[in-house]
Structures are given as C-alpha cells and as structure tokens.
Image: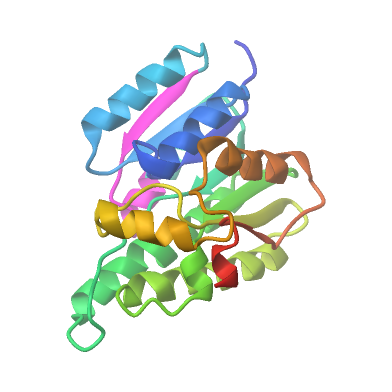
Amino acid sequence: MAEYPLALVTGASHRLGRIFALALARRGYSILLHYHLHMQEANATADEIRSLDVPVYLQQSDLTNVEEIETLFGLVDTIPHPLKVVVNSAAVMHRADARTLSVADWDATLALNLRAPFVCAQQASLRMREGGLIVNITDVAAQKSWDAFPAYSVSKAALDSLTRILARGLAPEVRVNAIAPGLALPSDNVSEAQWVKLVARIPLQRSAGEPELVAALMYLIGNDYVTGQTLVVDGGYSLL
C-alpha cells in the first residue's frame, strides 16, 4: 500500500475546511474528512478528493460531545496511514446581543469553537510522532471587539491563546500554529451589500482568495521551525 500521511480536517464538508482538505489531498495526504450536519456536501468533497487518487475517510461526529471526538480518533487508529496533520476548522458563528445571549448558546459556541480543538489536540498528541502539526483556524475577530458576535469573538481569542499554550505543552514532538483569516468567504450573517462595504474598507480592498489561504497552511507545513504562531491572512483588516 502506498504511504500517504494522514490529515484530519474538522468541518471539512464545506467552506474553509473543504478548501484545506482539498489542498492537503493535492499535496498527497490521505484525508480523514470530518463533518457534522452537511452529509451531501461531505460526500461531494470526498468525491473530489477521490478524483485525486488519494484515500479519503468520512466520519460524522458532533464535536461538542467529547465521546464522539474520542470515537473520531479511534477511527484514526484503524487507518493505515500515520497521522501527521490536524486542521481544527469546525466552528459556529452566531449573531447575538450580549445582553440577551443565553448561557446555553454561549456554552454551545465555546464547546465547538474552543473545547473541541483542545480535546482534538489532546487526542492527536497521543498519536502523533515527531513532526506532527496541529493548525487551529482562528479569525481576525480574535483581535477585535465584535459586539454582534460575542461568543464567537471570545472563542477565537481564546483559541489564539490556546494555540500558544499547546505549542509549548506539546513540543518538541508536535508543532501547533493557527491561521486567522479575515474576510474570506461571505457569511450567512452578512448581507451582500454589507459584505461589499466591509471589503471596501480593507487596505487591500479585496477578500482573501483560496490560494492565499492555502499558502498559509502550506507555509506552516513546510517550515518545521515555526510553532506557537498565528498567521493573519486578512489583507490588512486587523489594521483598521
């Protein structure tokens, strides 16, 4: 059997997770494609990966459930390829008012956006040998005070901090870094007119393209002396 290093990408059925999963497949990684609700999109992404002649494995999991994360990594143990890369991309972004945001909704956001990457990192570290890489997908929101997205913004700021903590705690065997996109893919939380207005404010006056996001991931894979860092790919949005 050909030797394909394994990459696990959470939330890989669509949006950023799909972009990163396909990029890793093109680089010769076998892919463990995690998804939660978007089965049709997950199957379509898996078909694209198969067309690249690399192995792909699908797993449906609710990452807010720690037992399901453990089951996901139990599948890793059955795959005949060594785990080398984990991309924590699964996340939710809900608009809310801090005055009325329920504790349940707060907890649900942090369970997926923060606790799940932490538990995934723990599980990955038990299986990765020297040279492993964990990449957390944060957000330029980590540097902002987005009052319309309180739980999301806090979760991404905390994930940025967690990235540095894990980089120290899992060294030297495993490197841990993050990618913080700015305006990359339009969100359901923003109208088309609002999106155009937001993009116009960016110093580079355009949203991030897929190649620019992929380049950040490939840099982190290729430079094995980088750990504990967050690559901000935002066209200057964080300067505003």
Quadrant of residue 127 within the rendered picture: top right
Question: Which residue sits at x=60%, y=70%?
Answer: 239
Question: Which residue sits at x=42%, y=76%?
Answer: 154
Work out whether 28 lies above or below 185: above
The residue nearer to you, when weighing 77 against 229, is 229
Quadrant of residue 167 within the rendered picture: bottom right
Work out whether 76 lies above or below 178: above
Residue 217 location, x and y as percent?
62, 43
Question: Which residue sits at x=58%, y=51%?
Answer: 135
Question: Which residue sits at x=60%, y=50%?
Answer: 134
Q: Is residue 79 left or right of residue 235?
A: left
Image quarter hosting the N terminus: top right
Seen from this angle, which residue lies furthest bottom? 99
Quadrant of residue 234 within the rendered picture: bottom right
Asked whether 58 falls inside the magenta stretch, the response is yes
Residue 15 location, x and y as percent?
38, 41
Q: Which residues are magenta?
A: 55-71
The residue nearer to you, when weighing 118 against 204, is 204
Q: Is residue 104 left or right of residue 51?
A: left
Residue 113 location, x and y as percent?
39, 62
Work out whether 101 lies above or below 59: below
The residue nearer to you, when weighing 52 against 131, is 52
Image label count = 0
The residue nearer to you, when weighing 219 against 140, is 140
Q: Is residue 192 left or right of residue 47?
A: left
Image quarter hosting the C terminus: bottom right
Q: Report whether residue 71 is seen.
A: yes
Residue 181 location, x and y as percent?
52, 55
Asked whether 107 falls inside the magenta stretch, the response is no
Q: Is residue 94 left or right of residue 110?
A: left
Colour mapping used in the image: rainbow
Q: Report whether residue 92 is seen.
A: no
